[in-house]
Amino acid sequence: QVQLVESGGGLVQAGGSLRLSCAASGLTFNRYVMGWFRQAPGKEREFVGAISWTGFTDYADSVKGRFTISRENAKNTVYLQMNSLKPEDTAVYYCAARVLVVSRDNYNYWGQGTQVTVSS
């Protein structure tokens, strides 16, 4: 059974930083693309970024240059380092997994999400 468990969310002031983690189990981690998505109140879920098992990354324009995705295949963990946070980054952040290539949709597995709140 595949499980993705996010952690690291919280309340931070604008301009601050947070690092989210996602621990995966029940899958061959180094064969999966890992993605991060977010959903703000009243809005649709949106793609934040993704990383392949080789380290290739893709980011949404809204976070490019501020957010960084990394992974430790030996620990079955993916990270989302968020810097220069803005109030509009406030959302529930989800970790997701899919096979093969980096993509902005069609993910097979999802975590439960972790809340990130950025105060102005």
Image (tube, rainbow, N blue to C red):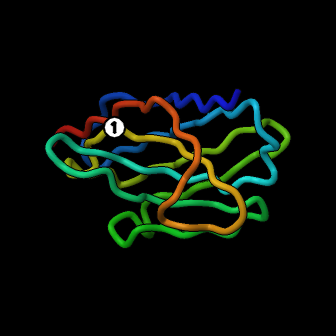
Q: With 83 as the anchor, is 28 left or right in this view?
A: right
Crowd tier of the residue under label 1, counting other residues whose Cα lies within 10 Å: few below 14, some 14–19, many 20 or above: some
Say above or below: 95 vs 9: below
Q: Left or right: 41 with respect to 25?
A: left
Left of 27 or right of it: where is 49? left
Q: Which image quarter is the N terminus in?
A: top right
The residue nearer to you, when weighing 84 against 106, is 106
How far across and how far down the image is residue 6, in percent? 53, 31
Horizontal and vertical percent position of residue 105: 48, 62
What amino acid is found at the position of numbered circle 1 in the picture? Val
Residue furthest right as drawn: 74
Closest to the observer, 47 or 106: 106
Question: Residue at the spot x=54%, y=53% of the render?
Answer: 107
Residue at 52% across, 39% down:
110
Q: Where is the C terminus found, in terms of image quarters?
A: top left
Residue in view at x 34 percent, y 56 percent:
46
Q: x, y percentage for residue 60?
A: 41, 68
Tag count: 1
Residue appearing at x 70%, y 62% in the figure: 52
Q: What element carries label 1?
A: strand
Give the percent coordinates (x, y) of residue 50: 56, 60
Quarter of the rendering containing residue 22: top right
Residue of label 1: 92
Residue 78 in which image quadrant: top right
Along the line of sight, the residue nearer the viewer: 13 or 61 = 61
